[in-house]
Amino acid sequence: MTELSCFQYSRCIENMTASVNRPHDRPRSKDQAMGGFFGGSRDLSQHQPYAQALSPLDVGHLRFRNRIFVPAHTTNFGEHHLPSAQHLAYHRARARGGVGAIIFESIRVHANSLGRPQAVCGFDPACIDPFRRITDAVKAEGALMLGQIIHLGRQVEGDFERTVSWGASPIPWSISALPPRPMDEFDMEQVIEGHLVTARNLVAAGFDGIELQMAHGHLLQQFMSPLSNKRDDDYGGSLENRLRFPARVLAALRAELGDGFCLGIRFSGEEYADGGLGIEEAERIVPMLTRQVRVDFVNVSHSAYVASYSLATQMADMAFDPAPFRTLPARIRHSLRADGFETPVFAVCRFTGLDEADAMIAGGGADAVGMARAHLAEPAIVRKSVEGRLNEIRRCIGCNQGCAGMLERNLPIRCLINPIAGLEGQFEEPEALPRKAARRILVVGGGPAGLEAARVAAALGHEVTLWERSDQLGGQLRTAWLMPKRANFKTFVEHQIAALMRLGATIVFNRDADAAAIEAFGADRIVLATGSTTSALPVAGNGPVFTLPDALRSPDQLGASVAVFDRTGEWGTLSALEHFADLGKAVTLFVPAASYAWRTTVYSTLANSRRLRERKVRIATLRAVRSYDGATLEIEDLSTGHIERLTGFSALVAVDHNRTDQSLYLALRRAGTPVMQVGDNNAPRTALEAVYQGHMAARAPFPPAPGITT
């Protein structure tokens, strides 16, 4: 058993934490740190960190206090199609965190674009008062508030509202979708009027500007793209014809709002789909629109809502290199400048820190940078950067589990590394809470749940000790980052370790915990975060069968041709398939379900599918492994009951759900010890649930001492 203070531990893991951001020398006062950033103008020198990103920007008649903004992103916080108190708390936290502007998510302009109860409408005047409360709150914190207005077109099939879907042509967006009804002139007039009514309501609600959504394969892009527009009338065929209806909407908005109101567009610079819009055509379209109608900014995104690789690029996860996406705003900005327009161009996608944003702006690739998931993970990313508190910033790791994953399920978005994202109206940051009497906290287990419990408890001022049975922290996430495309989980663990160092927690390594030792420690609260175990799935025969963790730790033992049998549908298996293929192995996946990766988000899986196809990974659904003797693999076809006998596999990786041992928890409960279960010790799930449970356990109130009434 080895006990280390966090200072001592920092010396032991120096190599591991080399990539953790260290704070700059702290300024002498907060005012000096901010340099007037939140109260007036700044005189930025080129030697100051983030000088470009933190400089003001004129956008139409508006002035952004800096060039970092929160782009529109669906939260699923709406209530009965109206903005909610949850929206208010969420956006106020990010405005307070120092961002220059916030663009409110996809405000629907017509009833057949709503889609679900959480979708927020702008055409009903009932939205004005709740929107006014949000704009007042955001502007009180010094940020500007813009609203994105949208008709989703064929993406909304009308199931909830029992309406009909509209589109440019009767082409469904996915194989499981219904074809939309092609729009006629009367439909187009309704959509234009819906945009105008929505714009009037947003102006009445105090919005500073409006962004017209012309991207992501929604209605206006459906008209622009040859992939979704096959019309043979005045609105189809040539580029000029395909632009006709979107340009009419934009022109009508400008006429309604006047030249003195900020109006911009969001535009996909690349659809990443065969036969769709490409950057070369986008470089022509944006100047064409700008010549017809005054546009105050162009917010360049990418992708289209088609069930293909394109959709996965929209919220590119940690497996993507973000560099190609950043060429798109740069090229459109260049095309605008070549046409004589100084219109500000915004960039988005996988910017995780002000260092990246500053480099993008300084290099001439954009005039402002949008950071959606980065602000989900860290609402105060701007403020903390300015104050030199870089090691306190929770940088987005691009896991897509709490944001895209919840979005797909029509649930409020969450964040793996920021468990109170979306709950800002209920919880403040632990560091912002007043300190109460310190209690003695023992956390048993240093995986994602235990690390978060220890971090939050220490931030609340408690005396925290963490026992870890191995000699390293991270738990099962250490297996995840053995795969290069899941390596960002290491960044998260490094951040947690750095926080424990900073907050003075004590870590004890190589410590097996039992009930007697825990009771002898005498903690006021025990947080049991001992995780779960991976057991080999029973398979008849005597062939080499590996668990997924064992296969990832020792891939050389798998041989050249690997069969994978997955009963979980989880991220781990999906990532491992690609990893094994990248190691040069022939890989075949067998799943008993009618699809694979059923517990991951389509926003990532569509990209995985393309990469697996490129790597020739075979996927066999409705198949169950029955036996493996090292030479023959017996597979049952679950649709017919037929047994297939396959040869040529050198190993089988059998993936099943983990299991947890409840004996220690039950022993402590029976002894009356104050214990809480978190993470996989509670029930095997993902890191998203584990971190949340660890966070909430550390926040839970303590029962009153004996003899004290409350």
Image (cartoon, grey):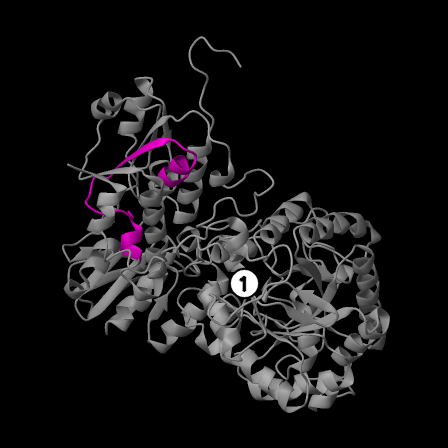
Relative image position of residue 203 (x, y in whole percent) = 81, 60
Q: Is residue 343 visible?
A: yes
Name the residue at 50% across, 32% down. Answer: 434
Secondary element at image label 1: loop
Residue closer to the observer: 19 or 472: 19
> Which residue bears the numbered disc 1?
371
51 or 324: which is nearer to us? 51
Q: Residue at x 31, y 18 (%)?
A: 670
Q: Where is residue 521, by image quadrant? A: top left
**The N terminus appears in which quarter of the rendering?**
top left
Q: Residue 460 colored magenta?
A: yes
The three-letter code of the residue at mark 1 reads: Met
How many residues crowd around disc 1 within 10 Å: few (fewer than 14), some, or many (20 or more)? many
Please, is residue 360 above or below residue 438 in the view? below
Q: Relative to 389, does residue 208 appear above or below in the rendering?
A: below
Answer left or right for 479 relative to 373.
Answer: left
Q: Report the side of 217 relative to 667 (left or right).
A: right
Where is 576 relative to 237, above or below? above
The x and y percentages for residue 198 are: 80, 62
Give whichever of 142, 593 is nearer the camera.
142
Task: Determine the residue positioned at 43% across, 39% down.
Answer: 695
Residue 531 screen position, x and y as percent: 30, 40
* Horizontal side, residue 658 vs residue 227: left or right: left
The single residue placed furthest to the top in the displayed view is 707
Q: Which span is picked out in magenta?
A: 454-480
Q: Which image quadrant is residue 441 in?
A: top left
Residue 270 makes an appearance in the image: no
**Dividing the picture into quarters, in which one does residue 305 lie?**
bottom right
Give the image location of residue 21, x and y in percent. Answer: 37, 58
Residue drawn 23% across and 55% down?
A: 14
